[in-house]
Image (cartoon, helix red, strand yellow):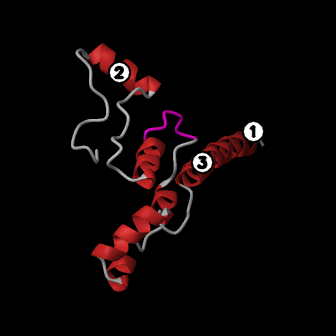
Amino acid sequence: MCTLKPPFDANSLQQLAKKIAKGIYAPIPSTYSKDMKNLVNTLLITDTKKRPRVHEILAMPLIKNRIKEFLTTTMANIEFNHTVIHKKDLYQIHNDEKANKKISAKEKKILKSNSRSNNEI
């Protein structure tokens, strides 16, 4: 990443998979700021529930300040004007979609049940 090297390195695919799964990687060199080290460490957390969401990453001072350096306010608004950035939780969106599919499946069952009942009359 920031060190221009892959975070995980191994001699075999199996060793590489183990390192990734366990979150074993070389420490970030001391030449990088504490904020940068924290960002990288946070991004490489193996538990996806503990890993920050996109909007949380973009809200971090380190990232916000870098965005301000490279984009005007207008350009930043254009670039980041979508649901992910506006604090909509992707996991919640995904769960809502799954719930909608379940509702649809339940509705289909009810409709089938109703049509059977109507056919029997």
At 42% from the left and 47% from the top, the residue drawn is 37
| Tag in front: 1 or 2 | 2
Residue 17, which numbered label? 2
Residue 103 versus residue 48: which sits nearer the camera? Answer: 48
Residue 120, which numbered label? 1
Q: What is the span of residues highlighted in magenta in the rendered image?
A: 44-49
Residue 27: x and y in percent read 38, 35
- Helix, strand or loop status at disc 3: helix
Which label's residue is closer to the chain start, 1 or 2? 2
Judged left or right of residue 74, residue 101 is right
Whether residues under marks 3 and 1 lie with C-beta atoms below 8 angstroms apart, the answer is no
- For this orientation, the residue located farthest to the front is 30
Residue 66: x and y in percent read 35, 68
Distance Cα–Cα, label 2 vs label 3: 28 Å
- Helix, strand or loop status at disc 2: helix
Distance Cα–Cα, label 1 vs label 2: 58 Å
Distance Cα–Cα, label 3 vs label 1: 37 Å
User: Mark 1, residues whose alpha carbon is within 10 Å: few (<14), some, or many (≥20)?
Assistant: few
- For this orientation, the residue located farthest to the right is 121
Instruction: Find out whether residue 45 is within the magenta segment.
Output: yes
Residue 52: x and y in percent read 52, 50
Which label's residue is closer to the chain start, 2 or 3? 2
Decide: is 77 above or below 82.
below
Residue 95, which numbered label? 3
Q: Name the amino acid type tagged 2.
A: Ala
Residue 95: x and y in percent read 60, 48
